[in-house]
Amino acid sequence: HNAASQPAHNTMNTHQPKRKFPNILITGTPGTGKTSLCQSLIGSYLQTQLGHPYKYHNISEIAIKHNLIDEDDVERNTKVINEDAICDHLENCGMGSFHADRDGAHLVDYHSSDFFAERYFDLVVVLRSRTEILHQRLEKRQYPQQKNS
């Protein structure tokens, strides 16, 4: 086996009681296919295979829609989200709960994972891609050069 294809460690949350349906984080560098994968999972697989509708949370879209932005980073041409407010939003959606009346069934899409509470997720999937493929995808999306280098 190639060491690069092996998981660094078990990403399943084994410290908390099980939810009826797992909360899943899809993360990775922009351009790796997080949103496409989430849309595919929401559109068919999770509903048909698990028999339960999942709630999709695109963190970037939530931050803009609910004005959970701390500042505009002009140099990097991006918005800096308010991480505490994002976590509060997810808590209000039931992400951190293990109560019997909560099914779980949340699918979260974001390029970072370091500020989320560990208890939010039962499974974390990190997507990655070859650098040359990422550059092509980001150029196609017309990302500024400083974000695509």
Image (spheres, grey):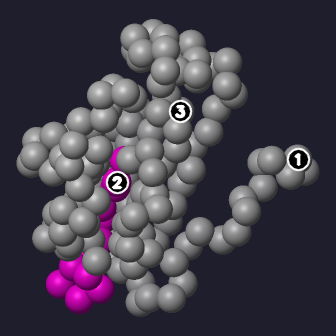
- Kindly identify the amino acid type of the residue bearing the numbered disc 2: Val
Q: Position of residue 140 (x, y in %)?
A: 45, 10
Tell me the number on the disc at residue 71: none
Q: Residue 25 appears in which quarter of the rendering?
A: bottom left
In the picture of the structure, the residue carrying the numbered disc 2 is 108
Disc with the residue nearer the chain's start (2 vs 1)? 1
Instruction: Left or right? Give the position of 121 relative to 88.
Output: right
Q: Is residue 65 above or below residue 102?
A: above
Query: At which x and y percent is residue 89?
Result: 16, 63
Residue 33 % position (x, y): 48, 33
Q: Which residue is label 3 attached to?
A: 32
Q: Which mark is residue 2?
A: 1
Determine if residue 77 is in view.
yes
Residue in view at x 56 percent, y 13 percent: 136
- Indicate the quadrant where residue 120 lies: bottom left
Question: Is 57 situated above or below 51?
Answer: above
Within 10 Å of disc 1 (Cα), the crowding (few <14, some 14-19, many 20+) is few
Q: What's the magenta region?
A: 97-109
